[in-house]
Amino acid sequence: MNKRYLLGVGLALFLGAQAQAQTEIIDKIIQEETENSQLKQIGHELMDGIGPRLVGSPQMQQAHDWAVEKYKGWGIEARNEPWGEWRGWERGITHIDMVAPWTKSLTGQQLAWSPASPAGGAQGEVIILPDLADEAAFSAWLPSVKGKYVMISAPQVSGRPDYNWEEFATEESFEKMKEERTASTNAWNERLQKTGKGRRELPVALEEAGALGIITSYWSQGFGANKIFSAYTKKVPTVDLSLEDYGLLFRLAESGSKPEINLNAQSKENGMVPTFNTIAEIKGSEKPDEYVVLSAHFDSWDGGTGATDNGTGTIMMMEVMRVLKKVYPNPKRTILVGHWGSEEQGLNGSRAFVEDHPEMMPKIQAVFNQDNGTGRIVNISGQGFVHSYEYLGRWMNQVPREITKDIQTTFPGNPGGGGSDYASFVAAGVPAFSLGSLNWSYFNYTWHTNLDTYDKIVFDDVQNNVIMAAIMVYLASEEEGQVSREVRIPTGRNGEPTEWPAMRSPTRKGGLD
């Protein structure tokens, strides 16, 4: 029997044993998540117990501290890593009542970083921003807003989403509504332009003239859903009203009924407060200075409780870490998870991490980011990394087919310049991938809206995502060498080569303007 034959048999036995060991770990991952998932409890503690996580708010700090303790309870090292500071603001109550021409409690809330009402609130007439001739006419009209609330958003022609019209309306009626809506929107935009003020400057001009507050309505094109962003006023409250109640006030004011409201919006300024990323690690046993990174932004807007943006990404990554710690406690490479702060204001937390840890970037095997909602993963792009199809394909092939069967892949794809935190790593040349999820009416109903709450989470889909990510992280950790970082420079619309996305510094002192 020759030595070459013996070596071949030995190699085959070794590879067979290695494959068997991998299969056993993968089976354990699936079993642990299927039989002992903690997603619902983690989600309840985060979304219901702590609530929304606006950067600079007490809830954001509470969430960071909670996550560190949660990881430590699972035997995982964790820390809060400072990266900057932000304007501290604490949301209080918002009570909005129409008191004339009849009485009704209205549905709405103050925008983030809104100044407070006087103690107990303030009552005043509601008026509409008029259609004035030009900037001079606007300046002449401004003194008339003193002691009044001013409506500055366009009224909606219909409070029914398009899909509702498509189901029930005649084609002619639907087309007529869309034409009216376009004309109304264009007319309102022209009305705003004639003031000579931008969307940031107009509320400030109104409050400087003595307005009691600003009333807006940012409908999200779905029943009951409004997007809740930030106020631009510095002294008086800005509130967002539901489409229905905004329309009621608008029509009453337009018809000369002089509606009045009592608005009591309370909030608290807390000065500049430190901002953090929560980092947790399972140390590598063979290559501790090489990394596989799990990524999800921790902050949210605060109209709802940040459930699908990005509570689901957060609890998914926490659960992946819990499962891996239990079934794969001694990984080959260090497995690190980053829960980033202030993604919503420009990927600030992840950009800070990339900027603050340049020595780590060449040693990251792969980054897996999840952000866009509660649905099962259905698309992955190679982000311009030429050979990503090879290693991602191998890893995905180990995931149960019932989980991956609907995933669309694009290889090598183009590098993402923004959108979520994976882009911070792509700009540094790190193979970083967005695990894009099924829509579940995300953009209409939960993205940055008042309806982004625990009840919108589809736990079966998130559980599938946990299994997939845990298997891929495990295999990335076990990979023999580092994966290829060769990139394809993207081409523009004209077919000419463009540039790889540039690294950008974070805003490290924010919320001041």
Image (spheres, rainbow, N blue to C red):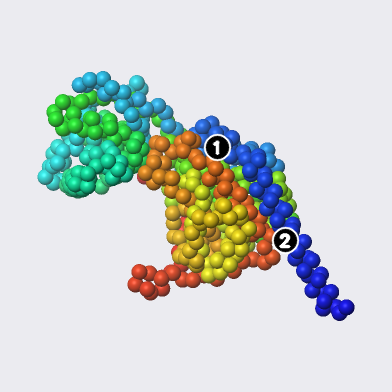
Number of dots carrying numbers: 2
Q: Amino acid at mark 2?
A: Ala
**Residue occupied by mark 2:** 19
**Residue occupied by mark 1:** 43
Residue appearing at x 75%, y 65% in the figure: 15
**Which part of the image, by quadrant, shows the N terminus?**
bottom right
* 310 vs 417: above or below: above
* 500 vs 367: above or below: below
Q: Residue 119: image x %, image y %?
A: 35, 22
Give the CA distance from mark 2 to mark 1.
Answer: 35 Å
Mark 2: give few (<14), some (14-19) or many (20+) Cα within 10 Å. few
Asked whether residue 351 is in view, the answer is no
Asked whether residue 1 is in view, the answer is yes
Residue appearing at x 62%, y 51% in the figure: 470
> Which is nearer the eye, 342 or 292?
292
Q: Residue 13: image x %, image y %?
A: 79, 66
Dot 2 lies on which element? helix
Q: Amino acid at mark 1?
A: Gly
Q: Which residue lies most toward the right here?
A: 1
Which comes sooner in the sequence, label 2 or label 1?
2
Residue appearing at x 34%, y 40% in the figure: 222
For residue 246, which quarter of the picture? top left
> Which is nearer the eye, 71 or 444?
444
Dot 1 lies on which element? helix
Mark 1: give few (<14), some (14-19) or many (20+) Cα within 10 Å. many
For residue 293, which quarter of the picture? bottom right
Decide if residue 294 is on the left or right side of residue 164: right
